Structures are given as structure tokens and as C-alpha cells.
Amino acid sequence: MTTSEVQVADFQLSPKLLEFQQKVRNYAKDHLGGAAVYDAETEFPREAVEVAGKLGLLRTTVDEEYGGSAMGNLASCVMLEEINAVCVSTGVTISVHNSLVNSLLGKWCSHEQKARWFPKLVTGEWLGAYCLSEAFSGSDAAALRCTAEKQGDHYILNGAKLWITTGSEAQLFVIFARTSEDRVKGISAFVVEGSWDGVSVGKKERKLGLRGSPTTEIVLDNVKVPADCLLDTEGNGFTIALDTLDGGRLGIASQALGIARAAIDMIGEHIASQQDKRGRPSASQPIQWEFADLASDLDAYRFLTWRAATLRDRGIRCSTEAAMAKSCASRLANRAARSAVSLLGLAGATGTNPAERLLRDARITEIYEGATDIQRLVIARGLLA
Ligand SMILES: Cc1cc2nc3c(=O)[nH]c(=O)nc-3n(C[C@H](O)[C@H](O)[C@H](O)COP(=O)(O)OP(=O)(O)OC[C@H]3O[C@@H](n4cnc5c(N)ncnc54)[C@H](O)[C@@H]3O)c2cc1C
């Protein structure tokens, strides 16, 4: 599909979505006040995630038949912008759980598999993790080496997954492993439960940002995985991984929008606090121009994100549109956070001010779920195809 063929021009959220947005905004105000502490102490926001589960925020991409709210991708984007404007560590936990794990299971699992795992995932009793990356396969995901060898009615999984979000907190892992040597068709997807023999949490990364979200290694040492934990068919894992990432990228685009919004709000408050004797803004014109440009881009990229989400909700492939949303929103988050730090001077560069945290968090949005350069390749390929 070329961009000119895409027809989505409803710029108003429905009353139901506006109500949901307000509910999430209240949740963020009432339960995410610890964001600075989670960052400083590298502490997982356990209580905040538990409350999110109770409020139904961990089931937006699950069908009602399995206990979900079936609100979909647009609702998830609206929700994730609100949460990430306050706490990215909670935001990424919820994004991965909904956009990478629940949506993947919803699309690629059998009825029996969904009935088995969703009851625990929709309440947050279990958290999910998505395990694609390895030491030598980040951007080049098809280079993964983790193996799954079929033995009778089960598979034996071996290898190590790296940089896994929620790795030390999750109970359910979607693992991509090699069932044959074929670079792409040799990859299959499995559900592995954290309590099984041979599954362990390895090294925990010390990160620039998102410090309340644990990013860990997941080690698989001769893990015996029943054959009924294979997702879809053997050899379809890479298709599943990439299709799921389209939705995941919308989650990260929304995270970036949240970060950008928080930074732009700080800049706006700073400008508003500087007034001349007649009560007019006294900030210099270049500062006001930057504020105006950032706020305009925020609106534009939000629509880019919501367009892609709407396409996905309609079952239309949105790889190009999702990559546009993520690459634009994540670069905006960095620009806005950098401007906030610069404008506030020394205050912006110290840990007592959220601006420096926003800048550190923003950097990550340009790396994971496909680095910006990879998004640009996806966009170019999509448009030229
Ligand atoms: C905080 C965090 C959480 C993460 N969570 C997860 C998770 O839950 N599950 C998971 O599976 N993975 C996760 N990852 C891994 C993440 O998806 C990878 O870091 C990402 O795909 C980039 O891979 P890489 O780090 O190996 O960088 P590389 O692939 O080495 O890329 C580094 C840079 O090289 C350039 N580059 C690479 N290849 C190309 C190319 N073909 N063309 C042009 N430029 C290129 C890009 O500029 C890129 O930024 C996480 C990463 C982080 C930082």
C-alpha cells in the first residue's frame, strides 16, 4: 500500500476513548508519582503495574472471549501516551505486555492456547516478555542462534536471549528459536513458562534510561517445551515476530509521544513563568519558536501514530505507517527533551529535575523495537515496493 491509498481521516476520539483516556490520566496522576524513584533506585514499579492490571490496562488487545476488553491498538496508543508522559518504566512494561505478548498470542494461538494463558495475563497475575534479540542478532533478527530441537512430543530449547524487557519479572516468555538452518523459515515461536526447568534470568543490564524496567538476559538450558507450546506452525516464527513488531512500534511511538509531551509541557511552563511587567511572555522569540515547532510536531506525529493504529485495528498491514510513527515520534522525544534540558540550564541537567530523566529515557526509544535507521529502511522499502 502506498501512503496515498491510505484513507483514515477521523481526527476525533470517540466518547468511549475519551472516557478511557481520562481514566488512564487519573491512574497516571494517582499511581505513577514514584517515577523519579523507580529511575534513581532502578526499582521495578510493581505496585503501579498491579493497579494497572486491576484497572483493566493489561488486556486492551485481548478478545472479550478470553477476558480482554478488545479495545484495540488505537486505545492502547492513547493509554500508553498518558502513562509514558509520567512514567516510562511502567509504560514499557505495559506496552510489551499488551502490544508484543498479548496481541501476538491473540493472533497466532489456537483456542486451547489462548484459554490456557490469557486468564493469567489479562489480570496481570502473569506478565509477558518478548524474546527475539540475542548477542549477535539485534537489528538483524534473522541471525538468531537459539535452537529448538524436536524430540518426540516436545522441543528442547537452548540458547540465551538478551535485553529482554521485564525479563526478571515475567512469568511467560515468547521465545523465537531456530528449528532448522534456513535463515528465515528456520525460525519458530514458542511460549515458555518461567517456572520450567532450565529457564533462568541472567545478567541484568545497567541502562542509560528506563531504569525502573528490568532488561535482562534469559537463559535457556535444555528447556523441555511441550509441542503444544509451539505457536502457529513450525517455521513461521519470523513472520510472527515482524508482524507483532508493527504493533509494538506503535506502543513505542506512543511512549515517545508521552516523553515529548512531558518535555514540551515543561518548556511551556517555563515560558509562561517568564512575564514582562504587562503580563506578556517575555521569553525570547527563538524559545517561543522552538516551543511552537515542538508542539506542532507532537500533534502531527500523534496523528501519524493513530493512523497506523487505526489501520492495524482494521486488519490492514501498517509496517510502513508504524515505522513512520516510531521514527518521527522517537526523534521528536529526543529533540523535545534536549530542548527542555538546554532551556532550563543547570537545573535541567541535574537529577532534581525531570528533564534530564526524559532525555535519558528518550534515547532508548530510538534504539529498541527497531533502531531509527532500521525504521527508515522499512519506510523506504514499503514506499518503493
Ligand atoms: C532497553 C531495551 C529493551 C529491549 N527490550 C527487548 C525485548 O524485550 N525483547 C527483544 O527481543 N529485544 C529487546 N531489546 C533489543 C533491541 O530490540 C535491540 O537493541 C535493537 O533491535 C537494536 O539491536 P542492537 O542493539 O544489536 O544494535 P545493532 O543491530 O548493532 O544496531 C546498532 C546501530 O547500527 C545501525 N544499523 C544496524 N543495522 C543496520 C542496517 N541494516 N542498516 C542501517 N543501519 C544499521 C543502526 O543505526 C543501529 O542503531 C531491547 C533493547 C533495549 C535497549
Image (tube, rainbow, N blue to C red):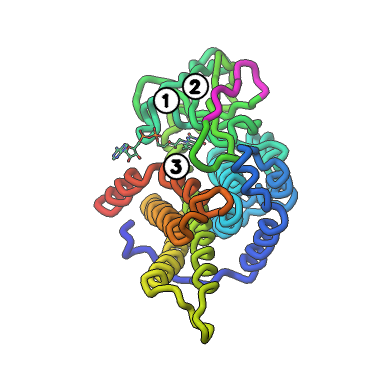
Q: Which mark is residue 160?
A: 2
For residue 174, say whether it is visible. Answer: yes
Q: Amino acid at mark 3?
A: Glu
Along the polypeptide, which appears first: circle 1 or circle 3? 1
Q: Residue at x 62, y 68 (%)?
A: 18
Residue farthest left in this picture: 384
Figure quadrant of residue 28: bottom right
Q: Amino acid at mark 1?
A: Ala
How many dots with numbers?
Answer: 3
In the rendered image, residue 122, in percent from the top left (x then y), is placed at 68, 44
Number of residues whose C-alpha sits closer than 10 Å to that of mark 2, classed few (under 14), some (14–19) or many (20 or more): many
In the image, the residue with mark 2 has its CB under 8 Å from the nearest atom of ligand 1:
no
In the image, the residue with mark 3 has its CB under 8 Å from the nearest atom of ligand 1:
yes
Q: Residue at x 45, y 61 (%)?
A: 343
Residue beneath label 1, please?
135
Q: Which mark is residue 369?
A: 3
In the rendered image, residue 345, in percent from the top left (x then y), is placed at 46, 57
Q: Does the magenta-highlighted stretch encompass residue 206?
A: no
For the residues labelled 1 and 3, the Cα–Cα distance comes to 15 Å
Q: Amino acid at mark 2?
A: Ala
For the residues labelled 2 and 3, the Cα–Cα distance comes to 18 Å
Residues drawn in magenta: 195-205
